[in-house]
Amino acid sequence: MAVQVRVLGPDDESVLKNVALGVFDGPIDPRLTREFLRDPRHHIAVSIDDGVVVGFASAVHYVHPDKMLPLSAIGPPTRSMWLLPGAIYTVLL
């Protein structure tokens, strides 16, 4: 099966229950996952290979008192970057 890139939304908590080791810095916290996915300023796209999240890129709408900035990508490239070079960042931006 081909690797799938998917932008997650508020109802996609279950997607982050099956994540390969090393993708995130630590274990996924269900409470933080729910908060992140329900905040419209937070964005995350994941690479899914055979039902397992193998990489991600996240971004946040950054608001500052004197300007509105575009999406700011955060987080290092993950293993998915070699699977789909630039694809996740393209989806987010």
Image (cartoon, helix red, strand yellow):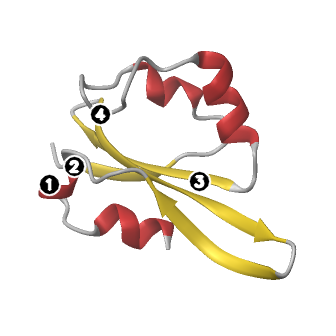
Query: What amino acid is labelled 2 in the image?
Result: Ser
Query: Relative to 90, does residue 17 appear above or below in the rendering?
Result: above
Query: Relative to 27, does residue 63 appear above or below in the rendering?
Result: below
Residue identifier under label 4: 23
Query: What amino acid is labelled 1 in the image?
Result: Leu
Label 2–label 1 contact, CB within 8 A: yes
Sequence order check, earlier mark of 4 and 3: 4
Element assignment for label 4: loop
Question: 10 Å neighbourhood of mark 4: few (<14), some, or many (≥20)?
Answer: some
Residue identifier under label 1: 83
Label 3–label 2 contact, CB within 8 A: no
Residue identifier under label 3: 43
Q: Is residue 81 left or right of residue 58?
A: left
Between disc 4 and disc 2, the foreground one is 4
Question: 10 Å neighbourhood of mark 3: few (<14), some, or many (≥20)?
Answer: many
Q: Position of residue 64 (x, y in %)?
A: 79, 71
Q: Is residue 42 left or right of residue 46?
A: right
Query: What amino acid is labelled 4 in the image?
Result: Val
Sequence order check, earlier mark of 1 and 3: 3
Residue identifier under label 2: 80
